[in-house]
Image (cartoon, grey):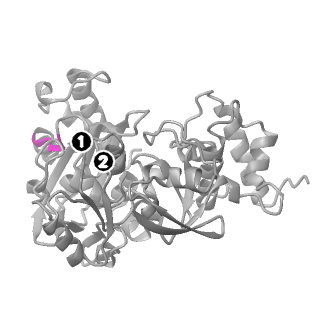
Amino acid sequence: MYALNYVKARSLEEAARMLASHPEAKVLAGGMTLVPTLKQRLARPSHLVDILQLAELRGIAAKGGRLSIGAASRHDDVATSVVVKKAIPALAELAGLIGDPQVRNMGTIGGSLANNDPAADYPAAVLGLGATVFTNRREIAADEFFQGLFATALEEGEIITRVVFAVPKRAAYAKFHHPASGYAMAGVFIALTRDGVRVAVTGAGPGVFRWKAAESALSKSLEPSALEGAALDASELNQDIHASRDYRANLVRVMAKRALAKLSGKK
Amino acid sequence: MAKVTIKVNGKNQTRNVEDRTLLADFLRDELGLTGTHVGCDTSQCGCCTVHVNGRAVKSCSMLAVQANGAQVLTIEGLAKNGKLHPVQRAFSECHGLQCGFCTPGMIMATVGLLKDKPNPSEDDIIHGLEGNLCRCTGYINIVKAVKMGAKLMRGKGKRR
C-alpha cells in the first residue's frame, strides 16, 4: 500500500469538506473493496476519509410503507435486522448472502452501492425495488444511479447517506455465487411493486441491469414458463474463465425462475 | 504517522504507526501477537480473523487506525487463566486441523458464529465458516470441532 493519510470524519459536513479540499482523497466506509485495492496498489489516494462511525449514516427504520437504511449499515446489520426482515425479507436474505461473515461484519450498503461492482448483490435489490439513493446533496433514483461497470451517478465528493425502499408487495432474490469469491455469477431480484414487476440482474453483465423482457412477460403471468420466451441477448453479457456468455444467460434464466418460485412461496 | 490506542485482549496498547499499517501487521509486528496469521493477504482465507468490538473481521483488510479506540480480541486472548476456551479445546480434541495454519482464524470465526447461533446445524457451520479456508481440506474434523465447541459452550458434555 502506498503511504496515505487517514482522517476520521466527525461529521458528514467535515467529510465533505475534506473531500473538497483534497481532490485525491477517497471515502472509506467498511473498506471491504477499498482496502484490498489499496494493498494491491491499484489506487493511490492522498487521504482516506473514514465515515463509518458517522451518526448521520446510521439507523434502519420502516415507516409509512418505506424502509430507510443508513449508508453505514453493515451487511450483517441488514441481514439480521428485525425491521428489514419484516418489511422486505428478500433484502435481509440478500444481505446475508454477501461475501462471508467477516465481510458482512465490515462492509456497508453505501460502500457497496458507491463501488457498484458488476457482481455485487445490493445493486440488484436497489434497482429491482426501484429504491432511492440519498446523498449529502440530492436524491437519485435507482434507474439513474447505476451506470455500468463500477460507474454511478455520484459526483466527485458526493457521499451516500441512506437508501430508501418502497416496501413491495412481494420480492425475492436468487443468486448463483462463485464458490471462491462469493460474488454473484448471476443474481436475479424480482419485485412486485405498486408500479408493476421489476427484474434486476447482477453478476451477468458489465453492470446491474433491468431485464425488461422478463418484466413484461411476468406482468402477464407469474408462472415460471412465462420466462421461457423472454429474450435475453447473451452477446451483452460477461465472459471470463468462470463462465461463457451463453452459460451466464442460462444462469440468469434459471435464477429468475428460482426467484419466481420463492416469490410464489413454492420454495 | 498516527497514534493509536487499541484495547487488545483486555489491555490498552498505544503505538505510533504509519496510517497505512494493517491491523494484522499491528498485532503481529508491533505487539508480537503472531497467533493471528496472514495466509493469503487478499481477504480470502480468514486466517487473520480477530474480533473488533465483538465482531469477527479479517484483520488483513482493515487498517490499525480504523480500530483506534476499539476492543480487539485475538486468539491469544481466548484462553483464561491457562485454561483453553471451549472452542480451542474442541479443535484440539476433534483434531480440527492438519497443518494448523488456518486454526486461529477458524477458531475466532467459530467463536463469532456461536455467539449468533449457539446450536448451529451442519449447514449453519458450513456457511458460518465460508470466510475461512483450510488448504489441507481438513473440513470434516473442523465441522466436528465446531459442533463439539458449541456443545461445550452450552454447558453440555463437560469433560475436564
Residue A209: in magenta span: yes
**Could you tell me which quadrant the N terminus of chain B lies in?**
bottom left
> Residue A234 sits in which quadrant?
top left
In this rendering, the answer to whether B63 lies above or below B107 is below
In the image, residue A251 lies at what x, y percent?
28, 30
Q: Residues within 10 Å of mark 2 (few under 14, many from 20)?
A: many
Do the residues bearing badges 1 and 2 touch, measured as CB atoms within 8 Å?
Answer: yes
Residue A121's disc is: 2
Label 2 marks a residue whose chain is A
Residue B131's disc is: none
**Mark 1: which amino acid?**
Thr
Residue farthest along the right direction in this orientation: B160
Label 1 marks a residue whose chain is A
One can see residue A264 in this view: no
Please name the residue shown 11% across and 29% down the image. A236
- For mark 1, what is the residue? A202
Could you tell me which secondary element the residue under label 2 belongs to?
loop
In magenta, the rendered stretch is A207-212
In the image, residue A86 lies at what x, y percent?
39, 67
**Mark 2: which amino acid?**
Asp
In the image, residue A61 lies at what x, y percent?
33, 75
In the rendered structure, the answer to whether residue B39 lies left or right of residue A137 reads right
One can see residue A155 in this view: yes
C-alpha gap between disc 1 and disc 2 = 7 Å
In the rendered structure, the answer to whether residue A249 lies left or right of residue A83 reads left
**Could you tell me which quadrant the C terminus of chain B lies in?**
bottom right
